[in-house]
Image (cartoon, coloured by chain):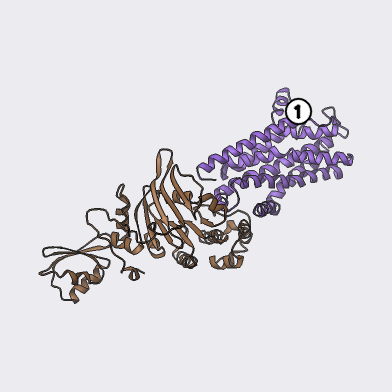
């Protein structure tokens, strides 16, 4: 997955400054976005949950909202669904207000439910799903929804007798029952084990391939990176980073390979496996690499004489933590 | 519109398929009627107006309506809030008010057969004989004026959580049933309790039915109190709904 995206321009990561991640996709170039968030402010009493948040998602895109708990992901989704109103700024969904988009049946959602199932208690899965379909004017065929969500064997079960992962699948079926153009998923895999998680995302990806727009919130970096076309990192109610998973990874998760060499050949170094950026200071070379092991192997292979080798840099998770711990980092986007 | 109808049918169907719900709402008033029917000597006249078996039939249909309303609205609503289902419905095309509206409507739909059933039991086992017109008037009147009970059930379901719902509903059933004079005619109570009964909608609901049979006709003051309850509780529901909405929880 990363390999396919390595050709994208990698940003210049500075060691000291927080990384500025580029937005290669969905940066306002499309005329009719699936959703638009402009300068949105939402408070809960004194607490500012969203602080002038800007966000745009193009139709057909799969976007992850990534951030730690309390970053503002769920608030963002609630605003996009019209469950909350912004205190300032504007929210637009499918070219209209969130409430109208929901009323038109063009939006589906899987919300966070805490310990609850998110389903009506005391009925069978099939009857809950039949009901939800009837609330929409143009629902997807029942069988197609059942098959897509993989809940065929759950139809005869009572909704309150489902395991966490099973309920999650049924809630996914509920979210897509109305054949929506746009789907919001708030931490959809929270109650799932590794295997159900994997099959859930397989399902999701298929759904996205039909040209639908998917926005999901997660605090799993891995999940965001593997599933989404674009990752929007949210922290303290602001977008702190925004770009394709690979770009994000390159900026936050690359390692630095430092060494001293006699006559550094910048062009050769730049072409080494894994390298995304080269910095020279005299004979001292600093390489940014997505794969430090491969880079070092390539160094040896190409016969580059080096000494004082040093590999530094945080792992994926640590880099993400570092990124979201930076207080009030402006959303630096470079226009394409 | 078809979405709302489907939702309404779903709600009613869910109530009628629930054995727990049916056992409580149908069982309580019918069993109590049979138990208390011979509690008083035959020919006992209640409050100087109607025979005991007639009083009991009217008060038990009141009680049945009350129990049905509290169980259909109250405890179910709080469980659905806890499960996240109420919120999920908010992101479907049906309008925001329809959740509450459908709850009240579905409650009223299931209250009707409960009232009819208690009347049938009164007819069959209590030997209650009324003119056909009076039966119809009584049924419709008892049913329509059960609206404050339905509103009460939904309102309480809104403000309590899933854990406290059951005790609160039980307490309400007891207070409204006993102190409203549904088990023991108000005339048999102390003065203080008689005054207290006049505050409760259950007293006025049963009194409305009794006045009709008694030949006193339509009890305007009872109807006004019930209407006031319906209005106040509906406003309370709307207020609570708005508050929850602005917090994004309902």
Give left or right: position of A190 versus A233.
Answer: right
Toward which corner of the image does residue A233 lie, by quadrant? Answer: bottom left
**In the image, farthest residue toward the front:** A31
Q: Is residue A235 above or below residue B182?
A: below
Identify the residue at image location x=59%, y=45%.
Answer: B78
Percent from the top left, x then y, of residue A46? 40, 38
So how many labels did they put on this image? Answer: 1
Chain B's colour is: purple
Q: Position of residue B37 (x, y in %)?
A: 82, 39
Where in the figure is residue A223, as x and y percent of width and height? 40, 62
Q: Which chain is brown?
A: A
- In the rendered image, which quarter contains the C terminus of chain B? top right
- Of A10 and B246, which appears nearest the observer? A10
Which quadrant would residue A222 be assigned to in this image? bottom left
Residue B127 in view, yes or no: no
Going 59% across and 57% down the picture, which residue do you hit? A159
**Left or right for A6, reference A79:** left
Task: Please report the residue visible at 53 percent of the width from the left and 53 percent of the height from the top.
Answer: A101
Q: Chain of mark 1?
A: B
Element on which disc 1 rests: helix
Residue A334 seen in render? yes
| Residue A258 located left or right of residue A225 | left
* Residue A277: image location, x then y, percent: 23, 64
The residue closer to the viewer here, B55 or A123, is A123
Question: Is B105 above or below relative to A139?
Answer: above
Q: Residues within 10 Å of mark 1 (few under 14, many from 20)?
A: few
Which residue has dot 1 on it?
A: B221
């Amino acid at each position: 997955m990363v390999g396919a995206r390595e050709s994208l321009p990698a940003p210049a990561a500075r060691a000291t400054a927080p990384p500025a991640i580029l937005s290669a996709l969905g940066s306002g170039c499309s005329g009719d976005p699936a959703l638009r968030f402009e300068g949105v402010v939402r408070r809960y009493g004194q607490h500012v949950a969203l602080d002038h948040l800007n966000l745009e998602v193009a139709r057909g895109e799969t976007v992850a909202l990534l951030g730690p708990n309390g970053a503002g992901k769920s608030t963002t989704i609630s605003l996009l669904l019209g469950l909350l109103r912004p205190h300032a700024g504007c929210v637009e969904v499918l070219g209209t207000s969130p409430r109208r988009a929901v009323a038109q049946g063009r939006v589906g959602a899987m919300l966070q439910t805490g310990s609850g199932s998110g389903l009506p208690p005391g009925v069978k899965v099939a009857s809950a799903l039949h009901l939800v379909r009837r609330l929409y004017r143009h629902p997807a065929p029942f069988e197609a929804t059942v098959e897509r969500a993989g809940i065929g064997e759950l139809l005869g079960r009572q909704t309150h007798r489902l395991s966490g992962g099973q309920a999650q699948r049924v809630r996914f079926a509920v979210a897509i029952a109305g054949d929506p153009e746009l789907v919001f998923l708030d931490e959809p895999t929270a109650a799932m084990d590794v295997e159900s998680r994997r099959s859930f995302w397989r399902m999701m990806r298929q759904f996205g391939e039909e040209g639908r727009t998917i926005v999901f919130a997660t605090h799993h970096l891995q999940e965001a990176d593997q599933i989404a076309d674009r990752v929007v990192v949210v922290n303290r109610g602001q977008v702190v980073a925004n770009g394709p998973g690979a770009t994000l990874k390159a900026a936050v998760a690359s390692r630095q390979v430092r060494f001293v060499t006699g006559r550094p050949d910048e062009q050769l170094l730049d072409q080494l496996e894994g390298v995304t950026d080269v910095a020279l200071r005299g004979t001292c070379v600093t390489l940014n690499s997505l794969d430090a092991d491969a880079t070092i192997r390539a160094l040896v292979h190409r016969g580059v004489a080096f000494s004082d080798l040093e590999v530094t840099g945080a792992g994926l998770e640590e880099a993400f933590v570092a990124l979201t711990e930076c207080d009030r980092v402006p959303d630096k986007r470079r226009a394409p | 519109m078809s979405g709302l109808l489907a939702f309404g049918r779903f709600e009613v169907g869910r109530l009628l398929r629930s054995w727990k719900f049916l056992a409580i709402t149908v069982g309580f008033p019918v069993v109590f009627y049979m138990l208390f029917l011979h509690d008083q000597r035959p020919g006992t006249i209640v409050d100087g107006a109607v025979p005991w078996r007639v009083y009991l039939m009217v008060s038990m249909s009141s009680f049945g309506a009350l129990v049905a309303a509290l169980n259909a609205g109250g405890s179910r609503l709080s469980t659905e809030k806890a499960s996240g289902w109420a919120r999920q419905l908010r992101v479907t095309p049906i309008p925001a008010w329809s959740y509450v509206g459908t709850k009240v409507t579905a409650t009223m739909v299931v209250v009707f057969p409960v009232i009819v059933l208690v009347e049938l039991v009164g007819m069959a086992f209590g030997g209650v004989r009324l003119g056909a017109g009076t039966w119809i008037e009584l049924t419709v009147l008892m049913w329509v004026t059960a609206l404050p009970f339905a509103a009460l059930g939904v309102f309480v379901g809104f403000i309590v959580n899933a854990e406290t719902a059951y005790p609160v509903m039980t307490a309400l059933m007891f207070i409204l049933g006993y102190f409203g004079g549904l088990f023991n005619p108000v005339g048999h109570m102390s003065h203080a309790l008689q005054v207290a009964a006049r505050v409760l909608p259950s007293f006025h609901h049963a009194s409305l039915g009794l006045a009709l049979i008694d030949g006193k006709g339509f009890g305007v003051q009872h109807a006004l109190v019930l209407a006031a309850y319906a209005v106040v509780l509906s406003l309370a529901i709307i207020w609570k709904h708005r508050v929850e909405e602005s917090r994004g929880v309902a």
